[in-house]
Image (cartoon, rainbow, N blue to C red):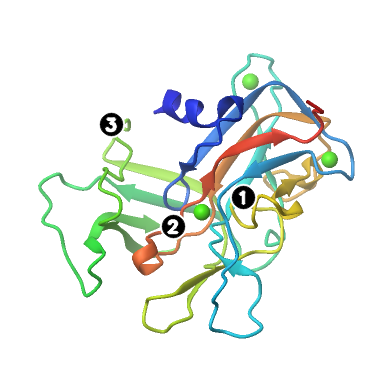
Amino acid sequence: MRQKVEDCLAYDARTMVTLGGYGGYIVVGFDHTIVNRPGEYDFKILGNAFYANDNPRPDAPLGGSSEPGIVMVSVDTNGNGVPDDEWYELAGSEYYKKETLKNYEITYYRPDENKEPVTCSNPNITDSTYVRWTDNYGNTGYISQLTFHKQPYYPQWVSESSITFKGSRLADNAIDESGNGSYYVLYAYDWGYVDNHPNSSEKSNFKIDWAVDSEGNPVDLPGVDFIKIYTGVNQFNGWLGECSTEVMGVTDLHIEE
Ligand SMILES: [Ca+2]
Ligand SMILES: [Ca+2]
Ligand SMILES: [Ca+2]
């Protein structure tokens, strides 16, 4: 799977990689350090976000298909070429808001392969209790299996029966504007998230200046060697499925050619 993902993204291949539900992530590296030019955008992350054309709500804020992913950056401090160094979150527009949960932890449980699917009123959902999750705020829920995606959802390269992800959790961003489940609008956050604004937007660019440590203190990084992106919202949106950040590439904005 690692090789498959690399083939999707490396050398500007621009093939979409879907990170899955909250916490699903990818780490990318480069053949050089992405330099931080203070005050300037340093890299762009491509997703597949778009704005809605037919939002029935007048004067709605920008939204459509925004599935915000949170960005972390790292410096290869120990020089071993591997991302085993400290990570810093890029504090986007939601970072300091009280609705953003810090130190969020979610655990997903491997579905029993003999599990009987549970259907519901939505014909696009083949199993509404497919992958169970619990979090450290006392919530529990399920990732539903949809007719559109027939592959196993629980990572097949993970041998353990459960898998835990930790990070910041953004507030839910989708609203069923139709009231009947037919038209969800996934609203964009202002800035600093992946798959949140269209690739043509400046708001799909990132500044290394936004990096903060685990306590939320700004850190001054001369450049970064690794970038991690994870799905930052834990929300199920009916026939669209779970909020799942897409990545199509990462570009150093300081390289001319
Ligand atoms: Ca910069
Ligand atoms: Ca390292
Ligand atoms: Ca998307």
Q: In the depicted view, which residue is nearer to us: 153 or 142?
A: 153
Residue 140, image quadrant: bottom left
The residue wearing badge 3 is 159
Q: Nearer the viewer, mark 3 or mark 2?
A: 3
Residue 42, image quadrant: top right
Quarter of the image for the N terminus: give it. Answer: top left
Q: Gap in Å between the C-alphas at discs 1 and 2?
A: 25 Å
Q: Residues within 10 Å of mark 3 (few under 14, many from 20)?
A: few
Residue 172, image x, y percentages = 52, 68
- Dividing the image into four quarters, tell me where ligand 1 lies: top right
Q: Are marks 1 and 2 in contact (CB under 8 Å)?
A: no
Q: Secondary structure at mark 2?
A: loop
239 lies above or below 200: below
Q: In the depicted view, which residue is nearer to us: 49 or 136?
A: 49
The residue wearing badge 1 is 194
**Earlier along the polypeptide chain: callout 1 or callout 2?**
2
Residue 152, image x, y percentages = 26, 43
**Earlier along the polypeptide chain: callout 3 or callout 1?**
3
Residue 99 in sight here: no
- Residue extending furthest toward the right: 38
Q: Are marks 3 and 2 in contact (CB under 8 Å)?
A: no
Q: Residues within 10 Å of mark 1 (few under 14, many from 20)?
A: many
Q: In the depicted view, which residue is nearer to us: 5 or 200?
A: 200
Q: Secondary structure at mark 1?
A: loop
Q: Secondary structure at mark 3?
A: loop
183 lies above or below 133: below
Residue 122, image x, y percentages = 25, 71
**Earlier along the polypeptide chain: callout 3 or callout 2?**
2
Residue 189 in sight here: yes
Q: Residues within 10 Å of mark 2 (few under 14, many from 20)?
A: few
The amino acid type, in three-letter code, at marker 1 is Val
